[in-house]
Image: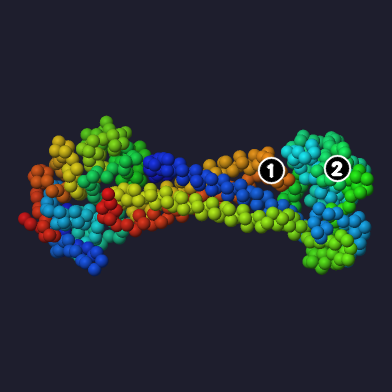
Amino acid sequence: MKYLPYILKHLRRHWFRSLLTVLAMTFCIFVFCVLQTFLAAVNQNLKAGNSSRLVTRHAVSLVFNMPQAYRDRIAGVAGVTNVAMENWFGGARKAGDFKDFFPNLAVEAEPFLQMYPEYILTDEAKRSWLEDQSGCIIGPNTAQRFGWKVGDAFQLESFIPPYRIGKPFEFTIRGIYATDEKRFPGTDKTVMFFHWKYLFEATGRRVGVGTYVTTIADPNQAGTISHAIDALFENSDAQTHTETEQAFRASFVAMAGNLALLLNLIGLAVIFVILLVTANTMSMAVRERRTEMGVLKTLGFSSGKVMGLILAEAGLLGAIGGAIGIFFSTGMIKALPFLPFIGDAVRGIADFGLPGSVALTGFSLALGIGLIAGLAPALAAYRARITDLLRQV
Amino acid sequence: MAMVEVRGVGKVYRRDAQTITVLDGLDLDVQEGEFLALMGPSGSGKTTLLNLIAGIDRPTRGSVKVAGTNVAALSEGALARWRSHNVGFIFQFYNLIPVLTAEENVALPLLLERLSRKERNERAMTALKIVGLADRAKHSPRQLSGGQEQRVAIARAIVGDPKVLVADEPTGDLDAKSAEEILTLMETLNRDFRKTIVMVTHDPRAAQRAKRQLHLDKGVLQA
């Protein structure tokens, strides 16, 4: 600690160069934290998927619906214990305005409640929802976001053409579900569920089924049962594709190409460039001070101590840049949902915020980059003989 | 026993296939409290000998004992510790750290000691008072004249109360008046503070201020 003022004074010696290096590091950690937060949110979403639940969709695309008649045939497949119909509604409080968006799905309420223990409701809330066709349940975060409570009413309008009926759908909140992070980590706290029947009736009984969710007795049989379900509809107009819920969620990520790989590659490229920038700064800083290194050694500073001072200086550059980068990324991550275009993409992600683990990794990375960048000049100073250092002009 | 005892010291530099013998079997004794001036032409080995005495270089052969310690036999770490306690080095170009104030420059060697900040500052101020620059403690080197910078460098050399001071052309970069002040200061340190001083110089007038003068030519001491 007693060397800190000495190190800080050296950083201030060429303050503009130090500032640029800190800014470069800030940018690096900012990009890293934002990208990793997005990836962490996606991964968390994937983890929340259940391997004992299968999802059946239209083989061509999710855009196409399947006939209701599939329900009973899927229920008859050996190993299937329950089936529920689900449709992504895509409703917004104002049509086409996704600023206040939250995920909303039409579900077959009774089997849904049996199949999804992660959404915890009181018996009274369950009963109340089941009895009210326009009733819905919402996540605690959505309730908090809009200040809604049980009994409140609101309207949603979908952007999906078959669900557009010339007026908004009206809903009454019949329950606010709770979650259990220990038993079901990563459960989305923002979703709204309403009756599939309500959607069906309101659209003039014209809509089909977006997805069938099934629970199976033995998760190890997921592959066999998936094949059995798809085989049922092999020769029909609407062929199906069945997979585990985890794989289904992962396919959303795959739709955007290999997103994780892309984001990681961008992050790596930025980190590599910043490593070179910082290494260059440190090399210049040390080369300019070779005589001073010689003086320090002459005064009795051991080679290890001189090396430590250079590494501490490089590490401090990294740490300052890293801390500022984390600060700005926290602000940016909070602001992302309110930005145009990108905001639409992240608003649906549950608990979108900078995770502590990402912040810690980002800070460690900044420190690591600083130390690695300082390693070569520090080693050179460590090895150099005093007489050679003092001979420099 | 002499404060500095150099016996049969040789120093050979190797550059590619070429070997350059700078010192060859040199013997030298410097008594405690002595002020010795080493003179000689460029390339005669004066600075090399000074570096060996200060423990910042090692002889190819022979031994260098300073205050009873065979400097050449110490490990790298032990030698660094030994330097911090036993030798004060005064450079021709002062070599102050430009980002530090005079006081901080003087206190720099004390960072190696277990001292509080207050103690370090007090000792630095004492050293600055000895060289007559207490009023310039908060000034940076660029705010000081050459002579003042060298006085700060001398304060840094004496702050750890070393037994031996080695000075490599301490007046080589100064005007006549400043050089005079520096030499007077070195005389004071030798006379009043009993510091043993070994000074390398080209300047015969500077050498005259020492108690003894020796000439070095082609690595051999002349009487």
- Secondary structure under the numbered disc 1 in the rendered image: loop
Q: Can you give x and y, in whole percent of width and height, for residue A173 in the image?
A: 85, 39
What residue lies at 16% left-to-right and 38% top-to-bottom?
B175
Q: Position of residue A272 (x, y in %)?
A: 51, 54
Please state the chain letter of the residue tagged with numbered disc 1 in the rendered image. A
What residue sits 22% from the left and 47% below the top?
A: B91
Crowd rating for badge 1 (residues with CA inside 10 Å; few <14, some 14–19, many 20+): few
Between residues B212 and A108, which one lies in front from this camera angle? A108
Q: Mark 2 lies on which chain?
A: A
Q: Can residue B136 be seen in this view?
A: yes
Q: Residue A265 carries which label?
A: none
List x then y, in percent, for residue A78: 88, 66
Q: Measuring 49% from the left and 50% from the top, which residue is drawn there?
A: A274
Is A180 left or right of B196, judged from the image as shown? right
Q: How many labels does the image show?
A: 2
Q: As rendered, which of A238 and B95 lies closer to the eye?
A: A238
Residue A23 screen position, x and y as percent: 49, 43
B37 left or right of A223 in image: left
Q: Judge from the rendering whether residue B79 lies leftward or rightward of residue A87; answer left or right.
A: left
Q: Quadrant of residue A165?
A: top right
Give the amino acid type for the residue marked by disc 1 in the picture. Answer: Phe
The residue beneath circle 2 is A164
Q: How far apart are marks 2 and 1 (CA)?
A: 23 Å
Q: In terms of secondary structure, where does tag 2 sit? A: loop
Residue B34 visible in the shown view: no
Residue A341: which disc?
Answer: 1
Residue type indicated by callout 2: Arg
